[in-house]
Amino acid sequence: MISRPPRPRERGIPEATVARLPVYLRALQALQDRGTATISSEDLAGAAGVNSAKLRKDLSHLGSYGTRGVGYEVEYLVYQISRELGLTQDWSVAIVGIGNLGRALANYGGFGTRGFRIAALLDADPEVVGRSVASLDVRHIDNLEEVVRDKGVSIGVIATPAGSAQGVADRFVEAGVTSILNFAPVVLNVPDGVDVRKVDLSIELQILAFHAQRRADGDGPGAAERAGLEVT
Amino acid sequence: MISRPPRPRERGIPEATVARLPVYLRALQALQDRGTATISSEDLAGAAGVNSAKLRKDLSHLGSYGTRGVGYEVEYLVYQISRELGLTQDWSVAIVGIGNLGRALANYGGFGTRGFRIAALLDADPEVVGRSVASLDVRHIDNLEEVVRDKGVSIGVIATPAGSAQGVADRFVEAGVTSILNFAPVVLNVPDGVDVRKVDLSIELQILAFHAQRRADGDGPGAAERAGLEVT
DNA sequence: CCCACTTTGTGCGTGCTTTCACAAGCGCGT
DNA sequence: ACGCGCTTGTGAAAGCACGCACAAAGTGGG
């Protein structure tokens, strides 16, 4: 038997859990603002819209941060989740493509939670370059490598038209950025070791349409549940 | 043995498959534009960024639309997927919250694929109401019920601040909308039978941050793969 | 007509996710 | 000090999802 190191939690948090931690974090911060000191898994699960057993198992991957018979201390849990998600350090973000969406992202102040700082805005259109958006000057895409280096950009956001997205991704990767958030409706091709996440409006709408049609077709009892709908 | 009805495909497409169909559809439409008539599962899988076995299994849920030894006929498959996703009918969409994001969504012409029509824009701010955005007049939120009824809105998009989102959702549900796409950073509470999908920028960033930190921490070979990264 | 080649459709093993159900642990009142 | 009630943390089971590997089925050439 290999002796376990002192570190309480094992490496390797399930991906499904990671995706829910930010939701828990937001619910906890709302509770914190309202002055709540402790909360049970049942109540927190309600606020996060998940099953309480799932929530407990998720949190158990971070360590034993609850007290039996009482619940979780809100402030402590906020800190632990923040640390696990890497929000105790600052992340520098560059947004490429300052169209409608890019502007909306740039102006999305607060950026959800602290931890993320918009370091630069880039665009290829000379009409847009030089303008000031969200108190940042829009710079030309040609400066991408320089900006990434000088500002220590570690997360790249692509909000360009579909045709330009792959090229921008290549340049981000070349410049050493290994985390990319892609809003363009294309599948990006990146080497191993680069993490790409995709946000796609039209895909979401199409999934909604599928379920809506399903409901309209095969009406009747239980149809909605079968379609895998929100159960609250 | 129960005699199988003439309909070739069974009801009940896995949720994971449904989420990928729009990606396949987009890849196929790109091929169509380029004039490609048929394509193998291998090539289509490449274009969609998935494993070819997964693609074949996904498509097999719709029916046997391929020809062994040849591949899939692009045009036919586009039609079948469109029909399955409910894109052969028109969906009327209302957007509530015409801030930066709402405007970006309204101007996001084409809306990915056809099938979705923006029927109305609504906001609570008198400063915004009455303005014209994307050749639509922004109407006051008080007209929500009327607009939903008159324009036959079946999908509601919420792009309001977090605080207003639940109220808007309630009104959508009350008005009979059963499909909601939520951009506000809150967990919406809706009755059974209502389908909510969430798009959340800061959650995506936090997931990226988690993996980036993981890579920085436990460097070394295989660390990226363990973090569940894009493998292309 | 038959054979070699190509590509689909799927049975099956594996691993991840969710959920149930309960033992273990903690606080409080007596 | 002790027992009662509450809540966490987790073993175990069930359900999904993924990907391999191959039989089935089609094409084209001789």
Image (cartoon, coloured by chain):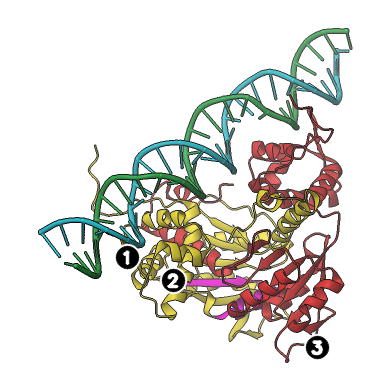
Chain colours: A yellow, B red, C green, D cyan
Q: Same subunit under labels 2 and 3?
A: no
Q: Which residues are magenta?
A: A90-109
On the image, the x and y values in percent for residue B4 come to 79, 30
Element at badge 3?
loop
**Residue tagged 3:** B130
* Res. A27 visible in picture: yes
> First in sequence: mark 2 or mark 1?
2
Mark 1 or mark 3, which is nearer to you?
A: 1
* Res. A140 visible in picture: no
On the image, the x and y values in percent for residue B73 come to 84, 39
Residue at horizontal 54 percent and vertical 69 percent from the top: B202
The amino acid type, in three-letter code, at marker 3 is Gly
Nearer the observer, A46 or A113 = A46
Element at badge 2?
helix
On the image, the x and y values in percent for residue A138 come to 63, 80
Q: Is residue A97 magenta?
A: yes
The single residue placed furthest to the bottom in the displayed view is: B127
Residue at horizontal 47 percent and vertical 76 percent from the top: A30
Q: Left or right of B43: which side holds C27?
A: left
Mark 2 or mark 1, which is nearer to you?
A: 1
The tag on residue A28 is 2
Spatial CA span between label 2 and label 1: 16 Å
